[in-house]
Amino acid sequence: MTRMLMRRVLLLTTILLLSTTGPAFTELSTNGVDRSPRNQTGVDVGVTSIAVKYTNSADEGNFKMFSSNHPILGFNRPATLYVIDGMVNVSSSLTIEVENFGSALSGVIDVTVSLNHNEYEFFELNNTTVQMSSLAGGQSNSINVAISPSYAGNHTLVVTATSTVADDVPGNDGTSRAFTVGSAYFNCDTLSGWNTGNEWGMSTDTSISKGTSCHIGKGSTSSYSNSIITTMVSPQMDMSDAVNSPLRTNGFSFFYTGSAAANDVLKIYAKTNFGGWTEVATISNTVDGSFLDGVNWQTFSVSHKGAASPLIPMDSSYFHSSSQIKFEFTSDASGTDIGYWIDDIVFVYDQKVRENEYQVSARGIATNGATPGNWGSINLEIVNDGNISETFIPTLQGLPVGWNAYYSRLSGTSFNPAQGLTATPGTPVEFRIMLQPDENASIGLQQMAVAISSQQYSSVGTVLPVQFLVMADRIPIVTPPDVRPSCPPSYSCTFEVELDNIGDATDVFDLSYDVSTLPSGWDVGFTWSQPTSIQIRPNEPTSALMTMTVPAGVAPDTVVSFDFTMRAQNDTTRTVTETIDIAASMVSDASVDLVESMKMDRMFVDAGDEVKLTYNIWNNATRQDIFEISIIVEEQGQWIIEQPTGPPVVLNAGGSTSFDVYITVPNNAQANDR
């Protein structure tokens, strides 16, 4: 057996070169060099190498054959031929070498190791910082860091060396490499849980790692039977937590050797989530037909998703709660051979982040209330308290009927809440909910809530109670005079403008006017006693007293306008401007007198008589004028004087008319009463 093992080592060197890279392998890379142009310190530290091995020998014995740890004693495979760097929940030790490329003492160096899940924007499976002693210029040293990945899949290992002394070339401080973690590994040292058919079993004829392998046939010195169809089915594996459409290849691989006769074949199947079996790989013909001169082992080389690796790809339909693979060997009646040996079956798939990695909280930042019909806002902050970047969905609960709302970033751009906001761990993300109360909304606090939920796991979330103040409004009203104010040319006159507040809140209103549209010589202003800021309570109207001046020579009935503005001090959006018309009136010239026939020094009447007096009125102006006629009586006593009735009198220039006044003398009047 010793001779066979030695021969196997020599032959693996050529056969396994068929696979050039494993899916987890990327050349060690550093960031671009960024040399500081000034303030040179002579310190330039950087990571020069990272070596990976399992922390304990038992794990190394189980997993090393398909792992990146190299060299492997007694197994001379190419260094670049591997599938995994480590196994899930298995400790690996990283040996990190750091060198000071500069000329000065570096000071203490912090070496930070982080392992990031490739399928997520920010999810650190590991973040560890250890300190290394100071390095002199040109000196290097290594340090060991243990990591135990809690998720299978394709990850990225990032290692950064940071000195306490400023680095002249910070761009080469860090380095990164791919780090793939296996989910399951079978060494064929037991078939417990496997379902094996006729002529399937464990064999000690040859193996890769644990002294036994899985074999279809009757051993290396015998042959399998003719005309058989026999299977070996793996245990069920819960892989329902696989990421859909991963970035890198997910699948499985294994080593195999042996030989089959022409027309005999070993097919490998994967079970779909509907329970059917789909062929994913085939082995036929001869790998090694005789073990007397050593054993040739082989694996796969598959180009998939931009890389060549030993992994047999499996799409998302094969990852479910009862995932399985099946080896099915078929022979016809034309001949037989020794069969095939299989060993070191490894599975790799990207695991979704578990629910317990997600946590979120929220807090209110500010609330700006609004009056009915106007917009206000609630500012909130989402805090990612979990271990992974995540998109969180905000939902406003309890929005009253008739209200409007939309979601906005602080920049002012709106966003669809169903698409959410992405937050990295520990970094708050602030946003704003804009709210517009209904025009008839009640004044006071309105209770609502904002629910924040994880996009990946809807059960992860929080609910933040919020309250929004519907503020009492102030609504200014300016009412122009019912009768257009007028004033004769070269005169100044006063008039009133009615002011009111029909809102629910008392406020002080600033009053102003704009006379820019008035013709030359016209003027409008407040009277000297009129304040320009007045407090108005709801539904308690008041007025502003104003003056107007009409220049000389303006034609009567000339109408001009100015703007009057009323603005609330506590809400300057509550502003109203009204246009008020004013006019020039004519200068009246009229005379009134008794008709000539009634003119006398005195008129004597008897007690109880009714006397009619007739007056003439003349319009002496050059324009038509309107006259309202009334009688002013002094010391009337018991005498009855009837006021003239009828509408106002319109007289053209130079025109005249008459009107009658009736006087009833008291029955008890005495001589010389008047």
Image: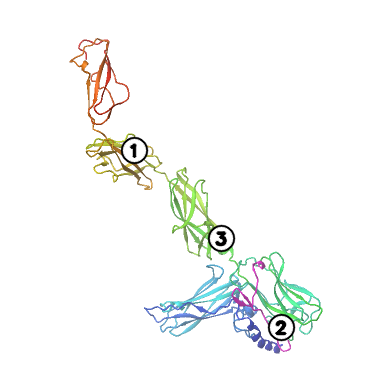
Q: Mainly helix, strand or loop, the magenta region?
A: loop
Residue at position x 40%, y 82% in the image = 42
Q: Give the residue number, with chain letter if any, for mark 3.
A: 455
How many dots with numbers?
A: 3
User: Which amino acid does the dot numbered 2 rest on?
Assistant: Val
Measured as percent of width and height from the top left, residue 365 is found at: 44, 56
Callout 2–callout 1 Cβ contact below 8 Å: no
- Indicate which disc, 2 or 3, sits on the residue closer to the N terminus: 2
- Which image quarter holds the N terminus? bottom right
Q: Report which residue position mark 1 lands on.
A: 480
Local crowd at mark 1 within 10 Å, few (<14), some, or many (≥20)? Answer: some
Q: Nearer the viewer, mark 2 or mark 3?
A: 2
**Mark 2: few, some, or many residues within 10 Å (few <14, many ≥20)?**
some
Q: Is residue 526 above or below residue 304?
A: above
Q: Position of residue 141 (x, y in %)?
A: 49, 83
Q: Residue furthest left?
A: 601
Name which residue type carries label 3.
Gln
CA–CA distance in space, label 3 to label 1? 59 Å
Per the image, the residue denoted by label 2 is 287
Decide: few, some or many residues near mark 3? Use Cα within 10 Å; few <14, some 14-19, many ≥20: some
